[in-house]
Image: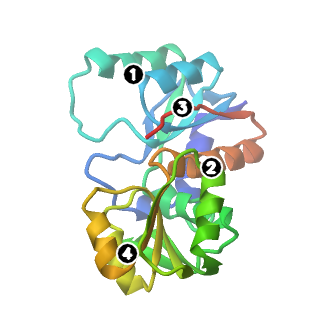
């Protein structure tokens, strides 16, 4: 058993929560408290009634999520919003959200871990916002076909737009939605992007600029950070942890 305040303090420091200016209303950090003690840690990508039900049923009383509850607050606490709060409170489950801090972290961030999956290292920052890098770029010397094959072994569905060089030199990583990443690839010297999802319009840009774009799923590319933070927290405080999967195919 550990104190909730100790886990929150560790997460705030490890993710450098205060350094990131996130989307309006994102509210990184502790979003819902519990009675003050933690016996089991959970990790999930999204806040929602179903992941909360699964977490509390598994005995989780500290749940780390990437996408928190407060994107468009204030909202009336009725309907599904009430159900979310009620599920957490009835299950005595605290909720901790870490969005951009867990995209950009150089060790346990989604993008650093995406690169590591491919045997690559985060070499330089990418998508710098308010002084903090959200994505990363890695140098690579590999065939495009080999990258595609590797990604297809890691992710259930990969959409490949192969308009760039067959011999890849530099890969940019942007987990989740990569729409803001494509316009910044040229400045970063990247010929290839590994991301979660893209709007249809970027196909033309890829043709015009000779880019490789690999979309591996928004959800699938953002499981890594919460899992890494939960595992590290579990080791630090000697607590069990569990990944709460909803099977989101998007």
- Which residue: 75% across, 33% down? 240
- Disc 3/disc 1 C-alpha distance (Å): 19 Å
- Disc 4/disc 2 C-alpha distance (Å): 23 Å
Q: Is residue 182 above or below residue 17?
A: below
- Which residue: 58% across, 24% down? 55
Residue 190 on image: x %, y %: 45, 81
Rendered image: mark on residue 125: none
Q: Give the mark, 3 or 2, whose residue is nearer the N terminus.
A: 2
Q: Give the mark, 4 or 2, whose residue is nearer the N terminus.
A: 4
Mark 4 touches mark 2? (CB < 8 Å):
no
Q: Give the mark, 1 or 2, whose residue is nearer the N terminus.
A: 1
Residue 139 on image: x %, y %: 59, 82
Q: Circle 1 is placed at which residue position?
A: 84
Q: Circle 2 is placed at which residue position?
A: 229
Name the foreground residue: 35 vs 74.
Answer: 74
- Disc 3/disc 4 C-alpha distance (Å): 34 Å
Location of residue 116 (image quadrant)? bottom right
Label 2: element kind: helix
Name the foreground residue: 167 vs 243.
Answer: 167
Rendered image: mark on residue 247: 3
* For discs 3 and 1, the disc positioned in front in the rendered view: 3
Rendered image: mark on residue 131: 4
Few, some or many C-alpha atoms within 10 Å of disc 4 (few <14, some 14-19, many ≥20)?
Answer: few
- Disc 1/disc 2 C-alpha distance (Å): 23 Å
- Which residue: 40% across, 39% down? 68
Query: In the rendered view of the protein, which quadrant contains the N terminus?
Result: top right
Image side of residue 245 versus residue 22, left or right? right
């Amino acid at each position: 058993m550990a104190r909730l305040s100790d886990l929150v303090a560790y997460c705030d420091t490890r993710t450098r929560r205060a350094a990131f200016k996130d989307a309006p209303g994102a509210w990184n950090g502790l979003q819902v408290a519990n009675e003050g003690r933690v016996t089991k840690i959970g990790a999930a990508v999204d806040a929602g009634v179903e992941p909360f039900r699964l977490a509390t049923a598994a005995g989780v009383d500290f749940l780390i999520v990437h996408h928190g509850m407060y994107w468009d607050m204030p909202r009336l606490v009725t309907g599904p919003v009430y159900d979310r709060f009620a599920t957490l409170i009835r299950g005595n489950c605290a909720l901790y959200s870490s969005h951009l801090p867990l995209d950009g972290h150089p060790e346990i961030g989604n993008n650093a871990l995406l690169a590591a999956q491919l045997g690559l290292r985060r070499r330089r920052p990418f998508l710098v916002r308010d002084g903090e890098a959200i994505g990363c770029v890695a140098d690579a010397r590999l065939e495009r076909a080999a990258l595609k094959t590797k990604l297809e072994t890691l992710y259930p569905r990969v959409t490949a737009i192969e308009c760039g060089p067959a011999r890849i030199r530099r890969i940019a990583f942007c987990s989740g939605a990569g729409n803001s990443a494509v316009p910044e690839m040229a400045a970063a010297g990247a010929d290839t992007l590994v991301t979660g999802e893209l709007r249809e319009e970027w196909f033309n840009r890829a043709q015009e600029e000779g880019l490789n774009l690999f979309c591996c799923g928004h959800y699938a590319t953002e499981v890594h950070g919460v899992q890494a933070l939960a595992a590290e927290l579990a080791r630090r405080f000697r607590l069990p942890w569990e990944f709460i999967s909803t099977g989101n195919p998007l």
